[in-house]
């Protein structure tokens, strides 16, 4: 048995192989789709994510079946923690569900593609630069896309501001209306405690060209994570004025707040 075959047999079980096979995306002759996704890399990524999801963070996901089995979908949640762990866990919840699993895309910050090796790896497992053009093209391709409208305002929050939603960008709402995409809100509880930050060194962040440099423990704590997915929300009509778009964005934000409160009420302890 060759090294690659040996590693594959250790990482991907027969059951996982069958499950993942149904989610493979159309790729070009070089093995990639237009956004850099690769079926083989995604396959190993899911296998590596499984123990992180089930053993380390012991995720409890409720309502994941609310995500439509097909068609364009925006999975919109609260951004939490200093690393994109929330996106990983939300994505695995959808990809691992028993009925109609889907391999979602994730909109990533502009900083990540600039990091050597990491940017390419994120592309190969479904991460895509958080650009409106990318998002629009993927919705036109009937993809399920994970979006965090808070952006770095959410991921860079300090511990004292945990679970306080920051200002939402409205770009996702414009795209949802244009492409008749369902919006599925999700409340993420637990990631805020995984890497609690007490301060942000802004001068150093500016010097290094980073979105933020948190003062935090250099470890990822095994906090227990609750994911609560709400019912699909649809926004139609011809009124795309900024006032109406902001009102509809606030409706989504309010639902995410409700789902966060539900998760906080459900958990018995942080760990």
Image (cartoon, grey):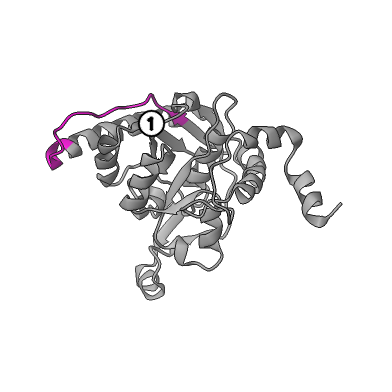
Residue 240 is one of the magenta-drawn residues: yes
Q: Is residue 208 above or below residue 30?
A: below
Residue at mark 1 = 184
Image quarter (top left, top right, bottom left or bottom right) of the C terminus? top right
Tell me where the magenta segment starts and ends, as one range: 228-244
Q: Position of residue 225 (x, y in %)?
A: 53, 37
Q: Quadrant of residue 200?
A: bottom left
Q: Residues within 10 Å of mark 1 (few under 14, many from 20)?
A: many
Q: Position of residue 11 (x, y in %)?
A: 74, 45
Is residue 174 shown left or right of residue 157? left
Residue 155 is one of the magenta-drawn residues: no
Query: Toward the viewer: 147 or 134?
Result: 134
Q: Position of residue 136 (x, y in %)?
A: 33, 45
User: At x 53% / y 60%, what residue is drawn?
Assistant: 120
Residue 164 in view: yes
Number of marks drawn = 1
Query: Toward the viewer: 181 or 97?
Result: 181
Q: Is residue 211 above or below residue 46?
A: below
């Amino acid at each position: 048995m060759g090294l690659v075959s040996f590693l594959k047999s250790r990482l991907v079980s027969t059951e996982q192989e069958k499950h993942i096979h149904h989610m493979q995306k159309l790729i070009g002759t070089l093995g990639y789709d237009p956004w850099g996704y690769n079926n083989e890399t995604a396959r190993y990524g899911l296998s590596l994510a499984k123990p992180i999801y089930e053993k380390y963070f012991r995720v409890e996901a409720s309502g994941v079946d609310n995500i439509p089995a097909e068609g364009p979908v925006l999975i919109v949640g609260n951004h939490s923690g200093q690393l994109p762990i929330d996106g990983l866990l939300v994505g695995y919840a959808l990809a691992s569900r028993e009925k109609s699993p889907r391999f979602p895309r994730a909109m990533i910050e502009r900083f990540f593609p600039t990091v050597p090796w990491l940017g390419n790896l994120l592309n190969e497992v479904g991460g895509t630069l958080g650009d409106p053009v990318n998002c629009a093209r993927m919705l036109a391709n009937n993809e399920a896309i994970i979006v965090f409208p808070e952006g770095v305002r959410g991921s860079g929050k300090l511990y004292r501001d945990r679970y306080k939603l920051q200002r939402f960008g409205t770009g996702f709402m414009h795209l949802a209306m244009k492409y008749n995409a369902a919006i599925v809100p999700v409340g993420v509880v637990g990631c805020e405690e995984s890497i609690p930050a007490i301060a942000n060194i802004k001068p150093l962040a500016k010097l290094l060209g980073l979105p933020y440099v948190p003062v935090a423990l250099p470890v990822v704590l095994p906090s227990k994570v609750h994911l609560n997915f709400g019912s699909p929300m649809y926004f139609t009509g011809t009124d795309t004025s900024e006032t109406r778009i902001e009102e509809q964005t606030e409706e989504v934000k309010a639902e995410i707040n409700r789902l966060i409160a539900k998760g906080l009420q459900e958990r018995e302890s942080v760990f």
